[in-house]
Image: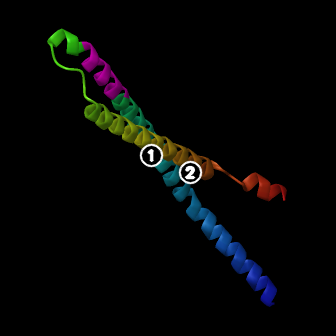
């Protein structure tokens, strides 16, 4: 008598849990899609800003002789390199975040019903 009750309770718990997973799955997919879009946009913006720093340095070298200003000093170049490196690190973090959201999407999309039914 105890075993059938345990099996019945376990089946009821699984049935209740499966009813709760549908909304959670759709929310997880929405979160993953939205998060991935934001992470991709942020990474693209950061990479674009990083490229602009390189363009700024090149522009200063070209404008120096034309305007009579001196070329950027080592201190300025070192500071701009630090900024460029920091932007590169931020872009890498955003790309990792995008990969994490892709993994969340894959996990939330996984449906084991076929495997469970086949045994």
Marks counted in the figure total 2
Front position in the image: 30 or 79: 79
**112 left or right, relative to 102:** right
The residue pinned by badge 1 equals 35
* SS for dot 1: helix
Q: Where is residue 92 in the image (x, y as percent from the top left)?
A: 47, 41
The residue pinned by badge 2 equals 104
Mark 1 packing: few (<14 Cα in 10 Å), some, or many (20+)?
some
Q: Quadrant of the C terminus?
A: bottom right
Mark 2 packing: few (<14 Cα in 10 Å), some, or many (20+)?
some
**6 left or right, relative to 69:** right
Residue found 46% across the figure and 45% down from its top: 93
Front position in the image: 43 or 18: 43
Q: Where is residue 98 in the image (x, y as percent from the top left)?
A: 50, 43
Q: Position of residue 78 (x, y in %)?
A: 32, 35
Q: Position of residue 11 (x, y in %)?
A: 71, 73
Q: Give the range drawn in magenta.
A: 51-62
* SS for dot 2: helix
Report the Cα–Cα distance between label 2 and label 1. Answer: 10 Å
């Amino acid at each position: 008598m105890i075993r059938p009750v345990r099996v019945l309770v376990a089946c009821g718990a699984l049935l209740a849990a499966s009813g709760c997973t549908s909304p959670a799955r759709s929310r997880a997919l929405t979160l993953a899609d939205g998060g991935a879009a934001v992470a991709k946009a942020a990474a693209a913006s950061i990479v674009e800003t990083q490229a602009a720093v390189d363009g700024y340095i090149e522009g200063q070298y070209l404008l120096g002789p034309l305007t009579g200003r001196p070329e950027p000093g080592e201190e300025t170049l070192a500071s701009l390199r630090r900024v460029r490196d920091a932007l590169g690190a931020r872009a890498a973090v955003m790309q990792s975040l995008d990969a994490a959201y892709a993994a969340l999407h894959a996990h939330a999309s996984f449906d084991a019903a076929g495997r469970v039914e086949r045994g």
